[in-house]
């Protein structure tokens, strides 16, 4: 009887000891993970050894690695056969891989996006109907911030399997600004005026040189195109500013910006007039 009680007590003590040891091991691994991540982030802020694009993925890998190590250590403490567990995890992983094909596609696409780098953090991109500034690239998804401040959560598979337009990568953008003038206005005066506006704005690059050409002759106006190059950060500011400056400059120079209009000439023959009178008479009788 006493031997049985001693055996039960010893078993409970062993179990309690293993539980406490497992908790301690989990806490230690957790804090080591936190220290590694914090140290990595602080070091990278000072040294910039790791590209900002890779940082979220690196942190995610560290977290999952620490979690797997914690599970294996805890199972080892309780005397489980880790070799069999690893084999079981492999078999379960194969089943999950078949069940989560779309998720694995996102992971594979995320790895390709990270290594081939069609875009980086803070780049403005457009892909299908999605567009915005890249905030974070992770294994599963890419986070974008749209121009109107919305949070856009895009699966990596959608980005990898479509054409990506990167507005930031080259650093420069071409600005095409269209102006309409009346047929009665002088083309050379309007062209020189637009070139002077482009040359006076220091944000517009001198090389390639700005140019002004006639693109089309429409029903109501002559279409002029002013083409110039700017830095990406200045593109929209220059575009908005040109709308105001060009209008004021053209008006001050006496050049007209025409609006769509159509002249209708009505010719009434004698037969048409007689028919009109008969119709009016018939209406008056009724």
Image (cartoon, rainbow, N blue to C red):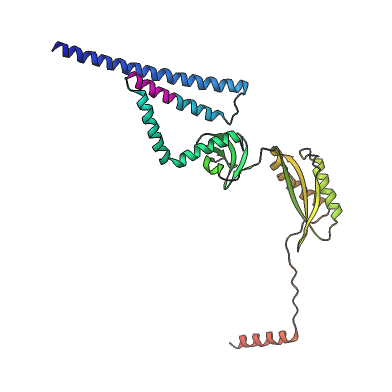
Quadrant of the snapshot with the C terminus: bottom right
Would residue 31 be seen by someone viewing this image from the given angle? yes
**Where does residue 92 sit, x and y in percent of width and height?**
38, 34
Seen at 61% across and 20% down, the residue is: 46
Q: Residue at x 73, y 45 (%)?
A: 175
Instruction: Determine which quarter of the picture holds residue 83.
Output: top left
Q: Quadrant of residue 117?
A: top right
Left or right, 84 with reference to 235? left
Q: Main secondary structure of the magenta part?
A: helix
Q: Nearer the viewer, residue 242 or 90?
A: 90
- Which of 149/69 is in front? 69
What span is colored magenta in the figure?
66-78
- The picture places residue 13, in percent across and down from the top left corner, at 26, 14
Q: How many marks?
A: 0
Q: Nearer the viewer, residue 272 or 198?
A: 198
Residue at horizontal 46 percent and vertical 25 percent from the top: 65
Let me know if residue 153 appears in the view. no
- Image position, residue 210 (x, y; %): 80, 45
The quadrant of the image that shows the N terminus is top left
Relative to residue 132, is residue 245 drawn left or right? Answer: right
Q: Is residue 12 magenta?
A: no
Quarter of the figure with residue 80: top left
**Residue 30 vertical position relative to residue 212 in the rendered view, above or below:** above
**Can you say whether 272 is above or below 76 in the image?**
below
The picture places residue 283, in percent across and down from the top left corner, at 61, 85
């Amino acid at each position: 009887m006493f031997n049985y009680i001693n055996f039960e007590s010893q078993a409970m003590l062993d179990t309690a000891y293993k539980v406490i040891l497992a908790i301690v091991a989990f806490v230690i691994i957790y804090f080591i993970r936190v220290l590694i991540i914090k140290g990595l982030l602080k070091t990278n802020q000072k040294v910039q050894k790791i590209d900002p694009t890779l940082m979220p993925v690196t942190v995610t890998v560290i977290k999952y690695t620490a979690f797997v190590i914690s599970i294996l250590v805890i199972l080892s403490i309780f005397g489980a056969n880790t070799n069999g567990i690893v084999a079981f995890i492999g078999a379960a992983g194969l089943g999950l891989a078949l069940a989560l094909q779309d998720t694995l596609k996102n992971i594979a696409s995320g790895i390709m996006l990270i290594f081939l780098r069609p875009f980086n953090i803070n780049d403005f991109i457009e892909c299908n109907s999605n567009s915005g500034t890249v905030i974070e690239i992770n294994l599963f998804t890419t986070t974008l911030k749209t121009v109107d401040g919305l949070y856009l959560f895009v699966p990596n598979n959608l980005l990898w399997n479509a054409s990506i337009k990167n507005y930031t990568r080259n650093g420069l953008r071409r600005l095409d600004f269209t102006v309409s003038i009346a047929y009665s206005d002088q083309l050379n005066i309007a062209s020189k005026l637009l070139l002077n506006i482009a040359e006076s704005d220091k944000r517009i690059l001198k090389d390639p040189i700005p140019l002004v050409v006639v693109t089309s002759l429409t029903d109501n106006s002559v279409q002029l195109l002013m083409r110039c190059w700017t830095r990406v950060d200045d593109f929209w500011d220059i575009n908005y500013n040109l709308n105001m400056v060009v209008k004021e400059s053209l008006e001050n120079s006496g050049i007209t910006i025409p609006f769509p209009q159509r002249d209708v000439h009505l010719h009434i023959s004698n037969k048409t007039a007689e028919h009109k009178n008969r119709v009016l008479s018939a209406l008056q009788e009724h």
